[in-house]
Image (spheres, rainbow, N blue to C red):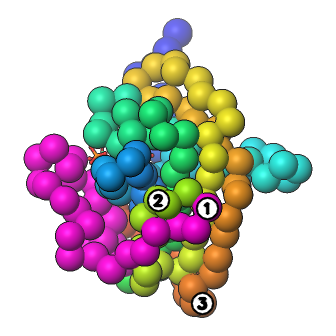
Amino acid sequence: MLDEKAKKTMLRKIPHGLYICGVKNGEEINGFTVSWLMQTSFKPPLVINGVKRDSGSHEIVKESGVFSISFLDSEQKDLAAKFFKPQRRVGNKLADVEFYSGEETGCPIISDSLGYIECKVVNALEEGDHTIYVGEVIGSGVHRQGEQLLLENTGWQYGG
Ligand SMILES: Cc1cc2nc3c(=O)[nH]c(=O)nc-3n(C[C@H](O)[C@H](O)[C@H](O)COP(=O)(O)O)c2cc1C
């Protein structure tokens, strides 16, 4: 038996960081807040990134096969809040945020983040309402020191 309440309680205990996933396809760029991200291989270095199927960014990653991940610091909750709104509703989320294009993928990287990785999609699993994109890390950089923004410290939930 699946106890709905217990399932939600337990799934919400899985710890997560909060990141901005940068996407680009041709001239189109976007970014969105992501928490369902983790490393899954040392060699080659792989991460998995769970991307909501009905988000604007999903189509962009599907077509371009690349994404970036900018690591936020614990004081950048406002930035995470800005990027969890859909582009189709709020327009260009990157308009007033300083960013640059990643050398390997061209995807937007938040300049004031702790650092970043750039990924090339090597596989995708379209199961449920999010697609698991398996990304090989093909670029990375550290911008500065700092404490990482964690979902559990924001009071927000994404899971259950
Ligand atoms: C705390 C939090 C965590 C989130 N984590 C994810 C995630 O891991 N994957 C995802 O696809 N969307 C996640 N989202 C939702 C996206 O940020 C949201 O769907 C966004 O509007 C997509 O933007 P876009 O339509 O401009 O691509 C999260 C939202 C919040 C509030």
**Label 2 vs 3, first from the N-terminus:** 2
The reply to whether dot 1 and dot 3 touch (C-beta < 8 Å) is: no
Q: What separation in Å lies between label 2 and label 3 (alpha carbons)?
A: 22 Å
Residue 145, numbered label: 3
The reply to whether dot 2 and dot 1 touch (C-beta < 8 Å) is: no
User: Can residue 118 be seen?
Assistant: yes
Numbered disc 2: secondary structure:
loop
The percent position of residue 69, horizontal first and vertical second, equals 52, 60
- The residue drawn where x is 49% and y is 15% is 2
* Residue kind at label 2, given as amino acid type: Cys
The tally of labels here is: 3
**Label 1 vs 3, first from the N-terminus:** 1
Residue 43 vertical placement versus 100 (above, below): above
Q: What separation in Å lies between label 2 and label 1 (alpha carbons)?
A: 8 Å
- The residue drawn where x is 38% and y is 48% is 26
Residue 56 vertical placement versus 100 (above, below): above
Q: Residues within 10 Å of mark 1 (few under 14, many from 20)?
A: some
Residue 75 vertical placement versus 159 (above, below): below
The percent position of residue 40, horizontal first and vertical second, equals 75, 45
- The nearer-to-camera label among 2 and 3 is 2
Numbered disc 1: secondary structure:
loop
Callout 1: CB less than 8 Å from ligand 1: no
Numbered disc 3: secondary structure:
loop
Residue 107, numbered label: 2
* Residue kind at label 3, given as amino acid type: Gln
Q: Residues within 10 Å of mark 3 (few under 14, many from 20)?
A: few
Please give the range of residues in magenta.
76-104
Residue 104, numbered label: 1
Near-viewer residue (74 or 70): 70
